[in-house]
Structures are given as C-alpha cells and as structure tokens.
Image (cartoon, rainbow, N blue to C red):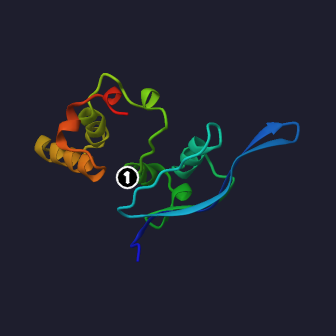
Amino acid sequence: MKGEVLLSVENLKKYFELGKGNTLKAVNGISFDIYKGETFGLVGESGCGKSTAGRTIMGLYNRTDGKVLFEGRDVHAQVGKDKDQMLKNMQMIFQDPYASLNPRSTVFEIIAEPMEVHGLYQEKKALRERVYELLEDVGLNREHANRYPHEFS
C-alpha cells in the first residue's frame, strides 16, 4: 500500500487560444497521484509543457479542464488566504537551476528562505535542523548546506 495521496491530478488540460481559431494544447489530459513521502519528477523534452503543467497544477494558470487536489482540496477552488496557505505547502522546482536559484546564495539559504518568508520557524535552531532534515531526505548531508548551486551537477 502506497499510503495517503498528497497530490492528485486527473485529466488536467491547459489550452491557450492563439486567435483565428487556433488553439495550443500545452497540457492535454495528464493524470497522476503523488503520495506523501514520495519523490516525483515530471520529465520530457524542452517545450513539451512541463512548466505549464506545473504552473497549472499550482493554480498559477487557470485550468482548461480536469481536477487538481492537494491534500484532498481543489487547488483551483482556493482563493485569498486559503490559497496562500495551500501554496505555502507546495513548491515547483524548474529545470534550469541557473535561472531558478540565486548563484550567490548557499543551498542552506535557498532552502531556508521560503520558510523564513512564511514565518514557519521562530527559532534559528529549529529552522537550521529542518533544512538539514530536508537535505537528508533527498540524499544529501549537512555539509552540502554550505555549498553553492553551481557546485552540484
């Protein structure tokens, strides 16, 4: 048994109207479940719709059709503070780390920043331990926290 579903995407579609009756089907009916504790990667060729899918899943783009549930709640039905609270628990990492990550920040600073912005940890020690725990969750150790993004392959 896989456990509890964290994110469920059902027949998600995102189309862009291009005018003159033309439609770009950027995301055309994807479905998958991500379970708590599971690692998931969306891979594909450049321009195939990965980033559009991610933005639509997170509710940054309106969906054309389909359903996206995060912890059982419809992502696209959330508004205001409810949406803000949900987005605190979701994150998308884009394929180009040089465009996504600040090259002047250490891995520790990059991981800690969103937790600091959202006030998740009042004590520095608790924040530091959480960063180390997250690094260990993905197979890295504490020493990696002081490295910079370009030092990873």
Say if residue 121 shows up in the picture.
no
Instruction: Judge left or right: residue 19 versus residue 120.
Output: right
Give how far across and how far down residue 135 sits, in percent: 26, 46
* Rendering quarter of residue 124: top left
Q: Under tag 1, what secondary structure?
A: loop
Taking depth in this image into account, of 117 and 147 the one nearest to the observer is: 147
Q: Is residue 25 above or below residue 117?
A: below
Task: Tell me: 46 left or right of 96.
Answer: right
Q: Is residue 24 left or right of residue 105?
A: right
Which residue is at 25% across, 43% downward? 119
Circle count:
1
The x and y percentages for residue 4 are 40, 71
Q: Note whether residue 69 is visible.
A: yes
* Residue depicted at x 16% and y 47%: 129
Q: Residue furthest top?
A: 104
- Reading the image, the residue beneath label 1 is 89
Residue 102 image offset from top left, x and y in percent: 36, 26
Q: Which amino acid, by three-letter code, is at mark 1? A: Asn
- Name the quadrant containing residue 86: bottom left
Which x, y percent locates residue 65?
A: 68, 58
Relative to 67, say whether 61 is above or below: above
Image height of 1 relative to 151, above or below:
below
- Farthest residue to the right: give it: 20
Give whichever of 22, 76 is nearer the camera: 22
Residue furthest front in the image: 153
Please state, as top left, top right, bottom left or bottom right, where the N terminus lies in the image.
Answer: bottom left
> Which image quarter is the C terminus in?
top left
- Residue in the image at 54% along x and 49% along y: 59
User: Callout 1: 10 Å neighbours few (<14), some, many (20+)?
Assistant: few
